[in-house]
Image: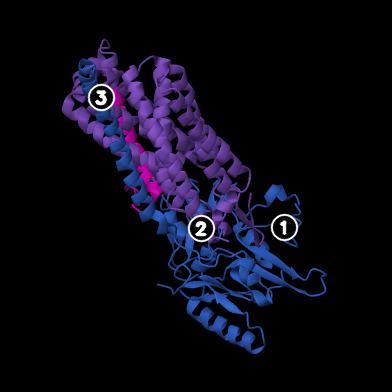
């Protein structure tokens, strides 16, 4: 039995599951928006702006979810400032500490990018046409925001898995691939969320959506590969998934969230809108279930008496 | 500076009386579970079941009986925070709430902890949990308040068989080694020390004399620091991040190339 089984569960459940899901979407949405912003054409601008909005809203919601998960939410600032000295609180070797600063800085860049996007969308509003907002929209500053925000966005999408790995809990600490798995899953759910929102807001040019779909299909294949390697890397601990959690992983994450969308994309190479929407919805469901399975299957294992309880 | 202090627990003389549990609860004013309503676990005489935010001492009962119950033995062990020399909880706490004291013990400062629960996931022994009254993570402080005024921790003071011994780690190790030799001479060859040397997390300032494998007592054989995974996990994620960004760029470039090629193709046709 792995040494990780003799530990206690940290009760990271629904607030954290939603944070991992939404934070991942926000980080990936910023990256995709930045790529469209920096390397694509004017017809892609509406989708880029949508990506920046998603990133900013996702960053705000992420912060709220993390705060709500604390047993003492009013002490959230202890993550950033030493409560007794007032000095900055930062531990470079602690993912939760680095993540707190990373989310804050990502939120800052997402805010600036969303403000510039809003200035472009609603230039009729005086405040959004002011000199500082116009400065944000200029090529140089906006490129810097896009690049730095993308780095922090990718960090946000992946550090959550590293945070779990840097523990002593079963499944999480039994592999070093969880960060990569969450990152790739964040990329697929981020693209799927943008496809859905673009459809809802009628914001995406068909060519932009085609690129997103192309990207999502390849990321889904990568996700399947990383998931298999992750399970293999668990060794004997993978036996935990010989349970309902394994069934949910197989049917919900692999079947519904990866294989079905890939199948839909193969059947409809013309990217018919309805199939795009259906595929994107399935990817979101699968991405959410991945986090449910990873978090809750480990939560059920804990030391009790002189033994261990497993699912 | 005072020298390192801690516990040496000789499980062979533990009688399972739980005086340590009671003394700990009384001194540290820890509440009962379920508002004091009795809850039978069905697991031997163990009804508190685990260490957590309101149970800083826990007496484990291991029943080893043959199937027909003609032969058997009880193993009893009073479990507590190990006050590791390299403490995973202290290493991973993002707020700096967990500190090392002048006695080389590990203490959670309740006024700094914000209840993120990272320490719970980091502890290799399942020692820490949230105390529902204070709403922060709590565990044994090795009676830091008593140590500061020269008193012995409440649990070891109350132990009627001296199964729990308190003192300078250096002296406790000598006592423990002598006891192991004595047990070996008496024929109990399985007797060994757990955490007395520096192989487990640099040494445990609460170490044990066991007469079976660690797993039998619900203890991990070779617990490690959580940060062992930091570098490889970060490198895999960083490589993935670079590849994802490149994939997006390749997709956009491919689209542009296709757009340029298409009119040519049409002309050829």
Tag nearer the camera, 3 or 2: 3
Are labels 3 and 2 on one chain?
yes
SS for callout 1: loop
Which residue position is annotated with label 3?
A: B258
Which residue position is annotated with label 1?
A: B47
Image check: B74 left or right of A125? right
Name the outermost residue toward the top.
A124
Q: Which residues are magenta?
A: A87-115
In front here: A225 or A293?
A: A225
Chain A display color: purple
Q: Which chain is blue?
A: B
Q: Chain of mark 1?
A: B
The percent coordinates of residue A299 (x first, y second) are 57, 47
Q: Chain of mark 2?
A: B
In front here: B171 or A130?
A: A130
The dominant secondary structure in magenta is: helix
Q: Residue at x 52, y 37 (%)?
A: A253
């Amino acid at each position: 039995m792995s040494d990780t089984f003799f530990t206690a569960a940290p009760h990271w459940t629904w607030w954290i599951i939603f944070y991992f899901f939404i934070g991942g979407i926000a980080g990936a949405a910023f990256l995709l928006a930045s790529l469209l912003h920096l390397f694509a054409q004017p017809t892609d601008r509406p989708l880029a702006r949508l990506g920046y909005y998603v990133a900013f809203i996702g960053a705000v919601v992420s912060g709220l979810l993390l705060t709500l998960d604390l047993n003492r939410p009013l002490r959230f600032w202890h993550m950033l400032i030493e409560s007794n000295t007032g000095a900055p609180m930062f531990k470079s070797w602690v993912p939760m500490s680095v993540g707190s600063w990373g989310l804050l800085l990502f939120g800052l860049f997402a805010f600036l990018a969303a403000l510039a996007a809003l200035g472009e969308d609603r230039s009729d509003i005086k405040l959004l046409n002011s000199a500082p907002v116009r400065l944000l929209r200029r090529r140089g500053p906006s490129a810097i925001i896009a690049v730095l925000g993308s780095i922090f966005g990718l960090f946000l999408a992946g550090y959550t898995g590293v945070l779990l790995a840097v523990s002593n809990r079963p499944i999480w600490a039994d592999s070093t691939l969880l960060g990569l798995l969450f990152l790739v899953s964040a990329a697929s759910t981020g693209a799927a969320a943008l496809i859905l929102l673009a459809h809802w807001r009628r914001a995406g040019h068909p060519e932009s959506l085609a690129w997103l779909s192309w990207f999502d299909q390849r990321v889904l294949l990568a996700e399947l590969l990383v998931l298999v390697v992750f399970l293999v890397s668990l060794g004997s601990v993978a036996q935990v998934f010989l349970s309902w959690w394994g069934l949910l992983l197989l049917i919900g994450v692999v079947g519904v969230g990866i294989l079905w969308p890939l199948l839909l994309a193969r059947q409809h190479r013309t990217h018919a809108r309805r199939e795009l929407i259906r595929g994107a919805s399935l990817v979101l469901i699968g991405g959410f279930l991945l986090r449910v399975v990873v978090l809750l299957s480990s939560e059920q294992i804990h030391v009790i008496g002189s033994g261990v309880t497993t699912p | 500076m005072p020298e390192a202090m801690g516990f040496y627990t000789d499980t062979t003389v533990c009688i399972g009386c739980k005086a340590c549990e009671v003394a700990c609860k009384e001194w540290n004013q820890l509440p009962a579970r379920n508002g004091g309503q009795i809850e039978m676990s069905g697991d031997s005489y163990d009804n508190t079941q685990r260490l957590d935010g309101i149970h800083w001492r826990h007496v484990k009962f291991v029943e080893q009986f043959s199937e027909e119950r003609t032969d058997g033995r009880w193993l009893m062990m009073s479990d507590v925070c190990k006050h590791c020399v390299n403490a995973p909880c202290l290493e991973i706490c993002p707020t700096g709430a967990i500190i090392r004291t002048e006695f080389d013990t590990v203490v959670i400062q309740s006024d700094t902890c914000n209840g993120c629960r990272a320490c719970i996931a980091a502890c290799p022994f399942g020692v820490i949990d949230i105390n529902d009254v204070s709403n922060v993570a709590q565990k044994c402080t090795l009676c830091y308040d008593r140590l500061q005024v020269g008193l012995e921790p409440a649990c070891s003071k109350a132990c009627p068989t001296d199964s729990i011994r308190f003192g300078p780690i250096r002296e406790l190790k000598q006592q423990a080694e002598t006891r192991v030799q004595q047990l070996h001479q008496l024929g109990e060859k399985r007797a060994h020390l757990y955490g007395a040397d520096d192989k487990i997390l640099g040494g445990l300032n609460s170490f044990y004399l066991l007469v079976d494998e660690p797993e039998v007592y619900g203890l991990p054989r070779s617990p490690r620091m959580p940060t062992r995974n930091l570098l490889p996990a970060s490198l895999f994620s960083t490589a993935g991040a670079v590849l994802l960004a490149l994939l997006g760029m390749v997709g956009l470039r491919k689209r542009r190339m296709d757009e340029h090629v298409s009119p040519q193709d049409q002309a050829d046709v």
